[in-house]
Amino acid sequence: MKTVVVSAVFFCCLALATATQYSCKAQAVQFPAFKSMENECIALMKHQVQKELNAALTYLAMAAHFSEDQVNRPGFAKMFFESANEEREHAIKFIEYLLMRGELETDIKDLISDPYPVRGLTWDSGLAALKNALALEVNVTKSINEIIKKCENPDVGENDYHLVDYLTGEFLDEQYKGQRELAGQISTLGKMTKSLGDLGEYMFDKKLLDGELPVLG
Amino acid sequence: MKVLIFVVALFAVAAGEFCYSSTKLSCDQDTTKGVNCTAAYGLAHNYIRDLQIYANMHITRNFQYLLMSSHFGNYRKEREGFKKLYRKLSDTAWQDAIDLIKYIAMRGGKMDFHYDEDGSDVTVEVSPHAVEHGLEGSRREGRILSALMALEGDDVRSTIAMSELESLGKSLDIQKKLALKAHEIYKASHRHDPEISDYVEDKFMHKHAKTIRNLAGYTRDLSRLLEGEKDTSAVGLKLFILDSYLEKVV
């Protein structure tokens, strides 16, 4: 019954749309010019959404790995599930900023194209995973810095003060703190596993799970 | 002596004590290398692939909803209610994907991000740079999201940037696909691994039914409001009113 309704509605809209060009859509409104982002900047911001989502999927893959029964590191799994959620939130923040500046009117379809976990990474140990996570974060930070550089001095147009300020305050701050946290954890775990390997990782995992490790910010 | 241990182990194996017998054999050889104790039991391994596909479906659809939500957040559409509705559907799909990944691990399986809606392996194109540095995300050859959109919309351009009514229709179709896949998993597994079918029923089926009922209700409301409406500014006002209601209710 519902499919009948939906398809009836669809045909109604289609028929009326072709006949009279309205019925499902409100009339268009005229706007004075107010958008001010430069094209290079917009492109870089859109590309960053994709990068954040790739990072999110990579963390998801790491979390899935540490959840397996034969790996069994629930602390690492918890940490990486949280990181995956965070990266997705970052991507949403980038989208929100673009919407706020009046962008993403017609080109939204290509904004997200199949995020997928970064390939070629292995997580034979918790330490390897933390090192890969740090490398991933460094890559993302570098990319944000590129946007800042480009939007401060675009080839065409003006310095985008607000965007640069926003990226620096909202994103770089969190990136650097996150990197410092990971570096500290790598240091701790590296020292714990130096001679007693598995025991060190086992204990570290439990501390991660209980939130006993120092967290920044 | 070793023969005796071996015979005892054989009896244990015959009695179905695989894990125990592997630990006994290993310990008697002063090692734990041969210990074979996994979380897998019964016929769950037959359904892990379906669960992987289901998780990947949720991930793909979460991004589709996110795009739809963002579309209604742009200044021209300015539909806060629709934006909230699709954002909620996106967040739910993402969390459900995570839950499925945890569930697959619980039943002794591994998550695989390759397999999606039509069950076929998606070939991944990896740039040499990506392999070398292992850092840059790689693009898929068979881009699931865009392929889906091409299949589902006569005009690919319009499958995200839709009108309000079209978007409701789209989301209803998506939710039904997700609901029906749950039914499929249930039907396949319930005689052989009822724990899986029970999980799928508890976690997904009832929630899906409610969501689908709500979406169908909104679609019906909007189509009745807009029926035969020839005045575009009246269409605008009606959309505004429905959107304000959605904003409160979602």
Image (spheres, coloured by chain):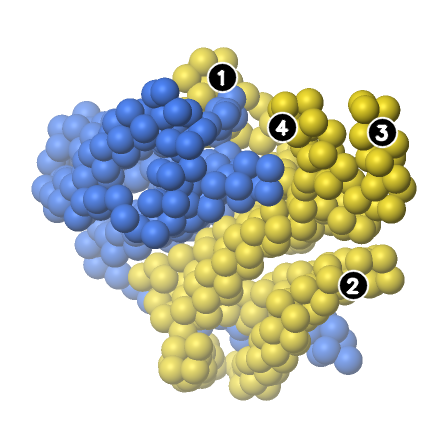
Residue B20: x and y in percent read 73, 41
Residues behind callouts 3 and 2 on a single chain = yes
Is circle 3 on the same chain as circle 4?
A: yes
Q: Nearer the viewer, mark 2 or mark 4?
A: 4
- As drawn, the label of residue B32 is 4
Chain shaded yellow: B
Pointer 3 chain: B
The residue type indicated by label 1 comes to Val
Do badges 3 and 1 share one subunit? Answer: yes
Q: Is residue A76 left or right of residue B22?
A: left
Point out the tag, 3 or 4, that comes first from the N-terminus. Answer: 3
The crowding category of the residue bearing disc 3, from other C-alpha atoms within 10 Å (few below 14, some 14 to 19, many at least 20), is few
In the image: residue B175, left or right of residue A126: right
The chain holding disc 2 is B
For label 4, the crowd category at 10 Å Cα-Cα, with few meaning under 14, some 14 to 19 and many 20 or more, is some
Q: Residue furthest front?
A: B1
Q: Which residue is mark 1?
A: B131
Q: Nearer the viewer, residue A197 or B59?
A: A197
Chain coloured blue: A
Q: Which residue is mark 2?
A: B194
Label 2 vs label 1: CA separation? Answer: 42 Å
Element carrying mark 4:
loop
Which mark is first along the chain, 2 or 3? 3
The answer to the question of whether label 3 and label 1 lie on touching residues, with beta carbons closer than 8 A, is no
